[in-house]
Amino acid sequence: MQVLDEVAIPYPTAIDLFESFSEGMHSLYLHAFLLTADHDQAEECLVWAIRECVEGPGVFMESTRLCIRKAVLKRAIELVAPVPERIDDVSLTSLNASTTPIESNAFAAILSLTPFRRFVFVMSILEGQSDYECAVFLRCSRRDVRIARLLALKRELSSDAQGEETLQV
């Protein structure tokens, strides 16, 4: 606790952080796994995130989960190092081209994305971060984020359509 202008500001203790972590462990692990697409790296992200939040600068009690999620994201970016595709590799015609069928499992569809597209999909679609936030974390342009999201959504929608066709047969 710190007193600022006669008002107590609650900072979490290590125990508070661990309780917050254990309450949301499944969600945090899934977040890390969808980012890294690797079980060992996902576990490393979680361990690193807890350590970062415990040893790092104080955060307010209400934002401990956010601190852990951002630390997971930072570590996943360090481990995977996702980079946007070069503009030569992504032409506008590829946005209109048909995609290859992939498994109807939503997790498999996300994990099959290129690392950069997967990060953008998880951050912007699943986590609701803005293009600006994604671009800052991924150190790229907002245009790169928009293109990657469009390609990821196209692939994801193609996956959903493929799954529906399978169910109808």
Image (cartoon, helix red, strand yellow):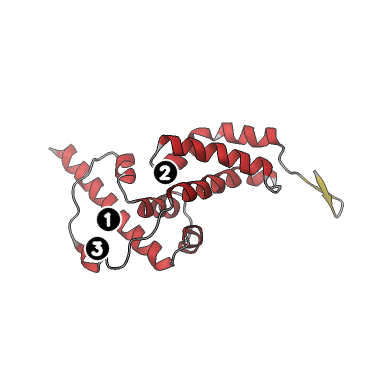
Work out which residue is located at the far right of the displayed protein and give it.
6
**What residue type is disc 1 on?**
Lys
Q: Answer yes or no: do the residues labelled 1 and 3 have beta carbons within 8 Å?
A: yes
Give the foreground label among 2 and 3. Answer: 2
- Relative placement, left or right, of 113 versus 158 is right
**What residue type is disc 3 on?**
Leu
**What residue type is disc 2 on?**
Thr
The residue singled out by tag 1 in the image is 154
Question: What separation in Å lies between label 1 and label 2 (alpha carbons)?
Answer: 21 Å
- The image shows a total of numbered marks equal to 3
Residue at the spot 87% in from the left edge and 51% down from the top edge: 6
Which x, y percent locates residue 59? Answer: 68, 47
For the residue pair 91 and 161, the one nearer the viewer reads as: 91
The residue singled out by tag 3 in the image is 95
Q: Which label is found at residue 36?
A: 2
Q: Answer yes or no: do the residues labelled 1 and 2 have beta carbons within 8 Å?
A: no
Callout 3: SS = helix
Q: Which label is found at residue 75?
A: none
- Please tell me in which quadrant of the rendered image residue 24 appears: top right
- First-in-chain label (2 vs 3): 2
